[in-house]
Image: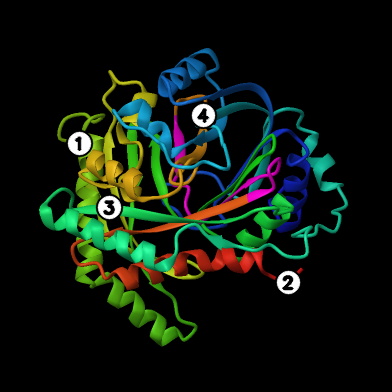
Amino acid sequence: MRLTEDFKHKALQWADQFTYCCVLDSNGYADPYGKYDLLIAAGAAKLLQTGTENAFGQLRDFYTINPTWMFGLLGYDLKNDLEQLQSANGDWLEFPELVFFVPEYLIISEGGKLRVELGDPKILHQINSIKPGDLQQVDSPHIAISAGMPRETYINKVRKLKQHISRGDVYEVTFCQAFYAEHAKLNPLATYESLNAKSPCPFSGYLKMKDKYLLCASPERFLQKQGNTLISQPIKGTAKRSDDPEKDEHIKWQLRNDLKEQTENVMIVDLVRNDLTRSAVPASVQVAEQFGVYSFAQVHQMISTISCELNPELHFIEAIGNTFPMGSMTGAPKIRAMQLIESLEESKRGAYSGAMGYIDPQGNFDLNVVIRSMFYAKDKQYLSFQVGSAITDGSDPEKEYEECILKASVILETIKGPR
């Protein structure tokens, strides 16, 4: 059976009936490092859900006991398991810090061909026979979005960060702000499908954990392992697209040659190289591509690719911990940047700027960066999303705010779209 949009829609409906499910969708992007078109994991045969204490150790033990497919989420605040850091900002979502589950069913599309990896092979035909119901995107008549941080507060905090940069405390900090809605009655699956249609990205995903939902339209890979090779692809550099093809190509050229964006990208590439060195065979860290510009529905992004060979004496879970959280969402130097993030941001990041993905039976994995995402706590009827930008010495606070709003635009359009 071949993958079609109709089958994908039906399969999402089917998977969403389970208490736990995870969908990872490449949306047809030609990714030279990607292996699968679509992964749909449904049901939790085995489950690990934990806080920050010894989280990576628990994940390693969980995989050792269950060396098979598993899917899940690493929250940003697992940084506290890795360094002497804390998270004291408000958390209204209460997502788990780490959750991974072994699925009862796993459907894979590879090269457009569907197969059942776990569970009854007949499930493909059962799904195909489903008659899709009419899904309403939003159950309530209106969802009022509020900013967690007023514009002037954001701009003043960026100025404070620039003072830290001028003093030499840091070179770069990814500073984020939250938007939220209370009393939000949302159909999470329908909203995810709407978001994915408006902003198809190579690392999109839908994660259901009981009454907590992650709706993700991420363009960024955090870390992948294939065989003995680790690959990281940080994004630093964003430009809004134009509907005019000639202007769009010029915008792309401008981004590729923008000194500020290149400076941001170089800093993060250096940080990622340093992170990978902790897990690498000596002298194996390489920059395969720098300043690559790739186009998505709303924006062009500057992406670099760094790789290394994993030290065979190191467990792959330790390699994930050695690079987490990702440099593109923290800054350089990393620990000092995370301290400033904690002191100046006003909401706990939680799942935002964490990572979602899979681990397979061979110890290969692919994890995204959880950005351009919505987070919904159905039990609290609380919806939120966060956006950020990289602050450097050359940053204009007003333009950084505008970049945040650009990144938020597709989410706002999805939430406030036609009922």
Task: Name the image quarter holding residue 290.
Answer: bottom left
Q: Is residue 269 left or right of residue 192?
A: left
- Disc 3 crowd, CA 10 A, few/some/many (<14, 14-19, 20+): many
Residue at screen point 24% across, 56% down: 161
Circles 4 and 1 in contact, beta carbons < 8 Å: no
Q: Is residue 18 in view?
A: yes
Mark 3, residue position: 173
Between residues 336 and 71, which one lies in front from this camera angle? 336
Q: Earlier in the sequence, mark 1 or mark 3?
A: 3
Where residue 321 sits, quadrant-wise, is top left
**In the drawing, what numbered circle is on residue 418?**
2
Q: Are marks 4 and 3 in contact (CB under 8 Å)?
A: no
Which amino acid lies under the numbered mark 4 shown in the image of this protein? Asp
Front-most of 322 and 380? 380
Reading the image, the residue beneath label 1 is 284
Q: Nearer the viewer, mark 1 or mark 3?
A: 3
User: In x, y percent, where is residue 46?
Assistant: 63, 20
* Marked residue nearer the N-terminal end (4 or 3): 3
Q: Earlier in the sequence, mark 1 or mark 2?
A: 1
What is the magenta range?
364-382
